Image (cartoon, rainbow, N blue to C red):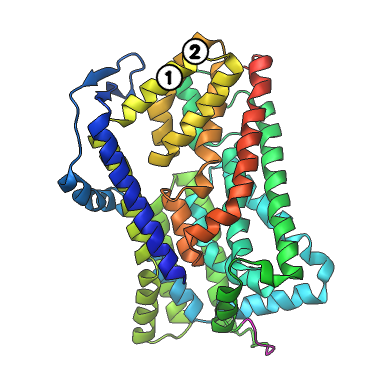
Amino acid sequence: MEQKRQFNTLIMIFAVVVGVAVITWIVPGGEYLSEVKEGKTMVLPNSFQFTESHPQGIGKILMSPFTGFVKAAEIIGFLFILGGSFSVLLRTGAVTVSIQHLAKTFAQKPNLQKYFIPITMLIFSLGGTTFGMSEEVLLFIPIFVPLALSLGYDSIVGLAIPFLGAASGFAGSIFNPFTVGLAQSIAEIPLYSGMEYRLIVWVLSASFMIYFVTRYANKVRKNPDISPVFEFDKQRRHSLHLDSSLLEEFTLRHKLVLGSFIFSLMLLVYGVLEYQWWLSEIAALFLSLGIFSGIVGKLSAAQFTDSFKEGTKDMVGVALIIACARAILVVAVDGKVLDVFLYACSGVISSLHPVFAAQMMFVVQGVINFFVHSGSGQAALTMPIMSPLADVIGITRQTAVLAFQFGEGWINPILPTSGLTMGVLGLANISWNTWFRWMLPIQIFFFILALLLLIPPVIFHWQ
């Protein structure tokens, strides 16, 4: 069932590629000039010019998934390494046994369980709002999904705790250097200024996200049948031996494997903060964790390689979706329609009332985010245009940065073109269709919240 739905997601993404290609035959080409500034390629705001159309034919459409795969090779390779390493980690039994013992602890002290989701989501939200935790949540999905199942929740809760926890912090960031910091530097306003209002935004973002996930988790625990992944989770509980009343012994071997995982997480945080580690360094870290776990877990060479291959095989469907998602950007850029869209939207924004203009900036950033999923890349593309446009329409550049922050952050968790979103769904083995239906009401709420939170900065001319 899940594989069939994932296939449908792949067809849907490829249909979008075809749709964008059709647009290149209708919309005239255009582009902004760009310059390299401090190592980053940024557009020149007043340099747009229409160019000769570049319609993308069948040949370009068929080549775009391959090009998309190449351009997304870093995150796809990361997912393969991560999937394989965690499969080895799970094969040792350390994760399952530790979760069994943790579930027993919560069962003996039920009052503790009501704090589990709020506290863990708050920790992930702090990671998102400070150092821009996003791709790092991939590491926690294989841990939190079985943990949530053992506590009587479902896979969606296990996915939502790290993913939506970090997303609430990322969207409501106080001083994330990869979004707020870069956007403010491009907008030429003091770095991390306006922190007081952003603190309010983060508190609201984290609080509401924790409320939605906790409310759903309590409903599922009382009535498991309402879960959209109920049948699948029954099979998963059995395969992970979470439905067994027998409590396996937590051996020294298990403790060493689990300890190495915790140490790796600590090393990850240190590496990201101190040395700006990115996917290649994190992949190397968790490949070493997989190798160490296999040795300590006394897996044979055949068991290790079979487990690793099984984990990478689970990521193939996700890799294809990410490749096709990146193909959308390839077709839009090669067809020279992405800059035309940005230029047209800037013209519409300039004619609106300042409040509606700020809100429209958020909507435009959300649409751009459908194509461009790098926070720094989106800032380099849009902020050189949105910053001077803010001066023209009478809102502060600080407000323009906030609109970018919302559009880049609060839209991401539902986009099928996002490598991160499809990556966490692949690790949790949840189809995008299922996730979309569950996430849509929450997404609508935060969309409305973003529109409302953009009103005070305009009224009070927030600096």
Residue 124, percent from left and from top: 62, 51
User: Which dot, 2 or 1, sits closer to the camera?
Assistant: 2
| Camera-side residue of 247 and 158 | 158
- Expressed as whole percent of the image width and height from the top left, the position of residue 317 reads 36, 64
Q: In this view, does 379 lie above or below 122?
A: above
Task: Determine whether 195 is above or below 393 in the image.
Answer: below
Question: Residue at coordinates 67% horizontally, 48% vertically from top-left?
Answer: 209
In the picture, the quarter occupied by the C terminus is top right
Name the amino acid type tagged 1: Ser
Element class at badge 1: helix
Q: In which quarter of the image is residue 173?
A: top right
Q: What stretch is highlighted in magenta?
A: 242-246
Checking the image for residue 135, the label placed there is none
Residue 441 in sight from this viewpoint:
yes
Q: Does residue 256 lie above or below 357 as drawn?
A: below
Q: Is residue 54 found inside the magenta-colored segment of the image?
A: no
Instruction: Say which residue appears at 57% left-offset and 28% top-offset.
Output: 402
Q: Is the magenta stretch mostly helix, strand or loop?
A: loop
Q: What element carries label 2?
A: loop
The disc label shown at residue 346, or none:
1
393 horizontally vs 319: left or right: right
Residue that lies at the very extreme toward the left in this rendered image:
59
Residue visible at 58% across and 15% down in the picture:
354
- Count residues near mark 1 (Cα–Cα under 10 Å), then give few for <14, some for 14-19, many for 20+: many
The three-letter code of the residue at mark 2 reads Ser
Give the residue displayed 26% in from the left and 39% down from the top.
22
Front residue of 132 and 256: 132
Position of 317 relative to 133 (above/below): below
Mark 2 or 1, nearer chain start? 1
Q: Is residue 401 visible?
A: no
The residue beneath circle 2 is 351
